[in-house]
Image (cartoon, rainbow, N blue to C red):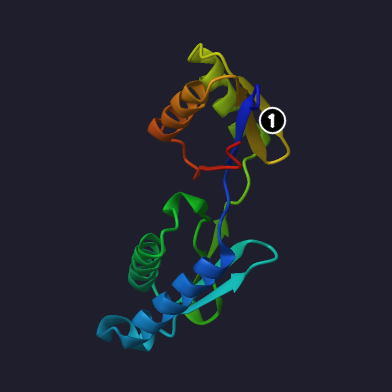
Amino acid sequence: MATNHSFDIVSEVDFQEVDNAVNQALKEIQQRYDLKDSATTLELNKKDKVLSMNTKDDYSRKQTIDILQTKFIKRGLSIKALKYKEPESASNGRLRQVIELQSGISKDNAKIIVKAIKDAKLKVNAQIQDEQVRVTAPKIDDLQAVIKLVRDADYDFPTQFVNMK
């Protein structure tokens, strides 16, 4: 039996599910009466982890964001992964908005998680490894306490727990 147990805290986005959510959102936008003539487009760039929206006015933009968030939730994706940039003017009086998809835990966010774990005074060891946090402990109960602690903390980025050993 292993003397130390571990798991990783990660922040990942399933881009296939994001693609499905975007396609469903576009289908609903084309069918909705109030958005039919808005010629709204949503384009997913998986390489840059960016979603680009182009629409005719602020009303259409807000409705599109609402539809997109609904589709994310239905597909089991966290809307915390969406980071909205300021809407900007595009040609012909249209609006463009860039939405970044947050994937991976930044160094600053990883430090916040590690500090919260250390402040809880649990007998665990938390280390930052690239875009994830590895937590090790001799007892599985301590690891489960860390999972509960991280889930209860309301971070502005999604967290998942993987590689439990």
Residue 25 in view here = yes
Q: What residue sits right under mark 1 in the picture?
A: 128
Labels in figure, total: 1
Q: Give the residue drawn at x 65%, y 67%.
A: 46
Q: Give the residue drawn at x 45%, y 71%.
A: 21
Q: Position of residue 164 (x, y in %)?
A: 58, 38
Q: Give the residue drawn at x 38%, y 67%.
A: 71
Q: Is residue 149 above or below residue 132?
A: above
Q: Position of residue 31 (x, y in %)?
A: 32, 87
Q: Give the residue drawn at x 58%, y 65%.
A: 15
Q: Position of residue 125 (x, y in %)?
A: 63, 20
Q: Quadrant of residue 162?
A: top right
Q: Is residue 106 above or below residue 14?
A: above
Q: Is residue 101 above or below residue 52?
A: above
Question: Which quarter of the rendered picture does the C terminus lie within?
Answer: top right
Q: Amino acid at mark 1?
A: Ile
Residue 89 in view here = no
Q: Is residue 95 above or below residue 125?
A: below
Question: Which quarter of the rendered picture does the N terminus lie within?
Answer: top right
Q: Quadrant of residue 26?
A: bottom left
Please state if 145 lies on the left or on the right of 125 as rendered.
left
